[in-house]
Image: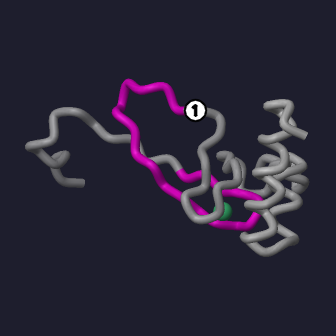
Amino acid sequence: MGEAERGDSAPRLRVSFWCSNGHETQPSFAGDAEVPETWDCPRCGFPAGKERENPPDPPRTEPYKTHLAYVRERRSDEDGEAILAEALAKLRGEI
Ligand SMILES: [Zn+2]
């Protein structure tokens, strides 16, 4: 056992977090920092927890979409623009 490394006065604490996809991330914290319960996985964005066998549940898989976003996804951009223009016109009372 040698001496602790010198030159880094603030001890860093490395904590492993695992997401439900099995990704491990190891953010490091200052020795006196409060380590959070969960950490966002940098690879998939899921929440990651400190228990490898029991990662936090992934976020719900049904993202909220506005009707317009849904329509725009299914149609060409051109149609989407027309629908948007129509919606705006309705808002303005032009139809
Ligand atoms: Zn992940």
Badge 1 is on which residue? Answer: 36
- Among the 4 quarters of the image, the one containing residue 61: bottom right
Q: Is residue 1 left or right of residue 37?
A: left
Q: Is residue 27 above or below residue 72?
A: above
Per the image, is 41 magenta? no
Q: From the top left corner, tell me how far across and down residue 73 is, in percent.
A: 81, 67
Q: Quadrant of the N terminus?
A: bottom left
Q: Quadrant of ligand 1?
A: bottom right
Q: Amino acid at mark 1?
A: Pro
Question: Which stretch is magenta?
Answer: 16-35
Q: Secondary structure at mark 1?
A: loop
Residue in the picture at 68% in, 46% down: 49
Please state which of residues 42 and 18 is positioned toward the viewer in this rendering: 42
Q: Which scheme is used to colour this image of the protein?
A: one colour
Q: Is mark 1 within 8 Å of ligand 1?
A: no
**Farthest residue in the left direction?**
7
Query: In front here: 37 or 2?
Result: 37
Q: Is residue 54 visible?
A: no
Which quadrant of the figure has residue 93?
A: top right
The residue located at (32%, 41%) in the rendering is 12
Q: Who's the residue at 83% across and 56% down the image?
A: 83
Q: Is residue 19 magenta?
A: yes
Q: Position of residue 3 (x, y in %)?
A: 16, 47
Of all residues, the one furthest to the bottom in this rendering is 76
Res 80 → quadrant = bottom right
Callout 1 crowding tier (Cα within 10 Å): few <14, some 14–19, many ≥20: few
Instruction: Give 18 or 88, whichever is nearer the viewer.
Output: 88
